[in-house]
Image (spheres, rainbow, N blue to C red):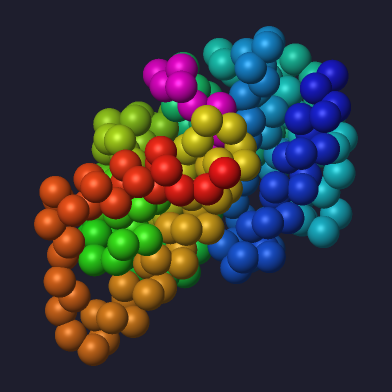
Amino acid sequence: MLEKLKEELVELHLELPKNNLVVWTGGNVSARDPETGLVAIKASGIRYEEMRPQHMVVMDVDGKIVEGDYKPSSDVYSHLYIYRHRPDVGGVVHTHSTYATAFAAVNKPIPVVLTAIADEFGGPIPCGGFALIGDDAIGKVVVESIGKSPAVLLKNHGVFTIGKNAKAAVKAAVMTEDNARTVWLAMQIGEPDVIPQEMVDQLHYRYMNVYGQ
């Protein structure tokens, strides 16, 4: 079931190592099927180059496995918590990308010092508190901390991003790391100037409503 969605998830997972967002088997992408409300997520511990549609596990939002021969990702309950509490979300991504996770390690948000951050995130990328892996605790921190941003850092852990679908969530993860790297480099030179919120709002509106086709 959900074969097209599973195939899309395999392709989107390959974007993570391609964009240097994960190493080995870390990280994961999930997607919610808009028709059935079921969620597909990768199996735990599968290497990206070996991943196939059959490695996707289909679950309902309460955690019951509907289809799949593998254990789902260890982060699955946090993904499901997000889906239960954010009906607007159709895709969730988790990474430990280097520069963004460096900000998480020191419990600092990524300040809105670039127009690209204003465009994509509408403000600073927030940093939520610490939570242990294994149940839905991380999902709770994500929901409580992410605000209107499509991305949030988790203290001492990594990055979670959300989107209207899995592709949008992957894009947010790519943009989070790209901006984190530039901001970190800028901080080696000096203290970057934060863009005033009024201008951030204008930039974000243009990007969301005017930019592109």
Bounds of the magenta span?
A: 85-93
Indicate whether 155 appears above or below 74: below
Residue 206 located left or right of residue 124: right
Q: How many marks?
A: 0
Task: Return the residue nearer the eye: 19 or 50.
Answer: 19
**Residue at x-position 15% and y-position 79%:** 191
| Residue 82 pos. (x, y %) | 45, 27
Q: Is-magenta flag for residue 89?
A: yes
As drawn, is 205 to the left or to the right of 212? left
Q: Nearer the viewer, residue 77 or 143?
A: 143
**Residue at the location (23% across, 89% down)?**
189
Residue under the image location 62 percent in, 24 percent down: 32
Query: In the displayed image of the protein, which residue is found farthest to the top?
Result: 36
**Residue 187 seen from this side:** yes
Q: How far from the left and from the top, in percent, is residue 27? A: 59, 51
- Residue at the image point whose x is 73% and y is 55% from the top: 14
Q: Is residue 121 visible?
A: no
Image quadrant containing the C terminus: top right
Q: Is residue 207 left or right of residue 134?
A: left
x and y, in percent, of residue 85 in the image:
40, 19
- Closer to the camera, 41 or 7? 7
Verify whether residue 206 appears in magenta: no
- Quadrant containing the N terminus is top right
Coordinates of residue 90 in the picture (x, y in percent) = 56, 27
